[in-house]
Amino acid sequence: MEYNTAREQMIIPEYGRNVQKMVDYTLSIDDRDLRTILARIIVDVMASMNPQVKDTNDYKQKLWDHLHIISDFRLDVDSPFPVPEKKDVYSRPTRIPYADGDISYKHYGLNLEKIIKKVKEMSDGEEKEELVSMIANYMKRSYLTWNRDSVNDETILTQLDELSKGDLQLKETDKLIATSEIVPSGKINKKKKNNNNNNRGRNNNQQRQNNNRKQR
């Protein structure tokens, strides 16, 4: 019995070993015209194996590209599309640089810190005050989304003061959005109920274990 581990590694496994064998056989043929005919047949077989590729505009070119890749770019035929460059196919993608600098609060994100920096540069006035209010309410929404079901407004204002280095302050007449408008009370009550049920279940399990120990 021949195991797959002992066979030659397939270049594109999605098409299976039979397609790989057909390509290898085509490479062994001396007649270029016959090789071209067989190459077109192989492409049709590859298309029938993956009918979803027909949904793309350039599916024919992709199939021919895959054919050349399977042949290790050694297939000399009359291809309807340019043969892809081997160095382009196997080249590594350009590394995406990550932004430098630490984020003070992950749940607020780096963009908020950039916004705060821009607002700090604005002249005092109604527009700046409105933006500060929007920033503070956004911070409260983000805090409740990623942390817990309630937060003291003083915590948000303290963190705003920290992020802006004391330059941005909410007007005394402005109030942050109510927690109930961000997190529905039903969700909070449901979570509390689930926590109570979980605690009750753990207590019951502990009681049963204690009773079993006493009986022993």
Image (cartoon, rainbow, N blue to C red):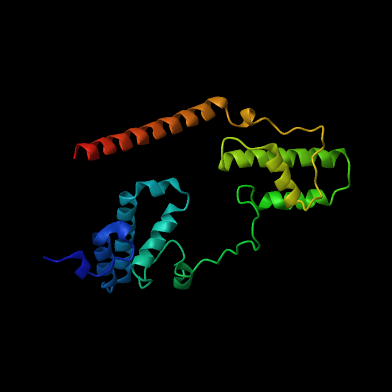
Q: Quadrant of residue 154?
A: top right
Q: How many marks?
A: 0
Residue furthest to the left = 1
> As drawn, is 20 to the left or to the right of 106?
left
Location of the C terminus (image quadrant): top left
Residue 146 vertical position relative to residue 113 in the rendered view, above or below: above
Q: Looking at the picture, tell me which residue is in the foreground, 180 or 5.
A: 180
**Residue drawn at 20 percent across, 70 percent down:** 6
- Residue 32 location in percent, x, y? 32, 71
Q: Looking at the picture, tell me which residue is in the foreground, 156 or 115.
A: 156
Residue 95 vertical position relative to residue 51 in the rendered view, above or below: below
> As drawn, is 107 to the left or to the right of 90?
right
**Residue drawn at 25 percent across, 61 percent down:** 17
- Residue 73 location in percent, x, y? 38, 71
- Residue 182 location in percent, x, y? 62, 32
Location of the N terminus (image quadrant): bottom left
**Residue drawn at 43 percent across, 53 percent down:** 59
Residue furthest to the top = 186
Q: Quadrant of residue 213?
A: top left
- Residue 212 location in percent, x, y? 23, 37
**Residue drawn at 69 percent across, 49 percent down:** 112
Q: Looking at the picture, tell me which residue is in the foreground, 51 or 192.
A: 192
> As drawn, is 71 to the left or to the right of 151?
left
